[in-house]
């Protein structure tokens, strides 16, 4: 989703909140309409913010809040901050890495390269996109992406921990391990150990993985 469209969605909900407050005053924030608006604001933040970002972390503090008036005020403030940061371009680089439409762009690029006879860069691009998605899944599900030293965890380690966390099963873990192995062979020049058809199936499989396990 383009940044402008993301901002537009938030603008609609922010305007609804402001209109509700202006029309009926502070008492309106405890109404059924306010409850619905709070849910929509919450869903928008979940949908548009990067998993594990400060926006989502702040939202987590208020998800179970029973006082509607208090909850909607806080969620509105989070949505306002997210909207303003999106407009300022401060979140664009991260969004480009983790949103599904960008993953699709990478996979389309890989398909174009493969069709042109460049199986090796196609495999590298697909594998890189897969690793970014695995890292984002870790953030979404509360799995550490760094070692105690602060160094980033390798893809294999994150894959193992996602399986342990119950995000997916052993069969899926083994498949991701095999995909990462193919990517590593391409990245290190072991071009004869795999063929064009394997890269094609790699791209198809990774696309299916993104759909089944969105981040």
Image (tube, helix red, strand yellow):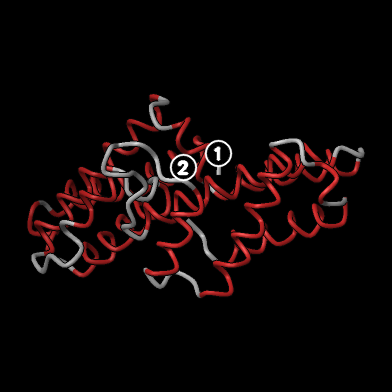
Per the image, label 2 sits on a secondary structure element best described as helix
- Secondary element at tag 1: loop
Viewer-side residue, 95 vs 106: 106
Residue extending farthest top = 88
Where is residue 94? Give x, y as percent.
45, 35
Q: Nearer the viewer, residue 206 or 8?
A: 206
Residue at 17 percent of width and 46 percent of height = 22
Please provide percent x and percent y for residue 173.
54, 67
What is the C-alpha distance between the residues marked 2 and 1? Answer: 6 Å
Q: Quadrant of the N terminus?
A: top right
Residue 138 as seen in the image, left or right of residue 109: left
Q: Mark 1, residues whose alpha carbon is within 10 Å: few (<14), some, or many (≥20)?
A: few
Look at 35% across and 36% down and name the residue there.
Answer: 151
- Vertical comparison of 150 with 63: above or below: above
Q: Which mark is residue 6?
A: 2
Q: Nearer the viewer, residue 204 or 25?
A: 204
Q: Which residue bears the numbered disc 1?
A: 2
- Mark 2 Cα within 10 Å, few/some/many (few <14, many 20+)? some
């Amino acid at each position: 989703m383009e940044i402008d469209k993301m901002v537009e969605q938030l603008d609609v909900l922010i305007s609804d909140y402001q209109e509700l407050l202006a029309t009926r005053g502070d008492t309106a924030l405890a109404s059924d309409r306010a409850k619905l608006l709070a849910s929509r604001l919450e869903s928008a933040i979940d949908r548009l913010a990067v998993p594990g970002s400060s926006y989502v972390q702040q939202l987590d503090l208020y998800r179970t809040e029973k006082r509607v008036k208090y909850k909607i005020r806080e969620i509105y403030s989070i949505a306002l901050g997210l909207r303003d940061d999106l407009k300022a371009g401060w979140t664009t680089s991260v969004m480009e890495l983790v949103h599904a439409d960008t993953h699709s762009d990478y996979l389309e690029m890989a398909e174009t390269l493969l069709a042109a006879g460049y199986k090796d860069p196609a495999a590298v691009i697909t594998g890189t996109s897969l690793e970014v998605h695995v890292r984002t899944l870790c953030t979404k599900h509360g799995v550490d992406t760094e070692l105690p030293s602060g160094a980033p965890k390798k893809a294999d380690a994150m894959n193992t921990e996602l399986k342990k966390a119950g995000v997916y099963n052993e069969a899926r873990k083994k498949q991701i391990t095999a995909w990462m192995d193919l990517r590593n062979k391409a990245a290190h020049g072991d071009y004869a150990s795999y063929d064009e058809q394997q890269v094609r199936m790699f791209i198809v499989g990774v696309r299916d993985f993104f759909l089944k396990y969105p981040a």
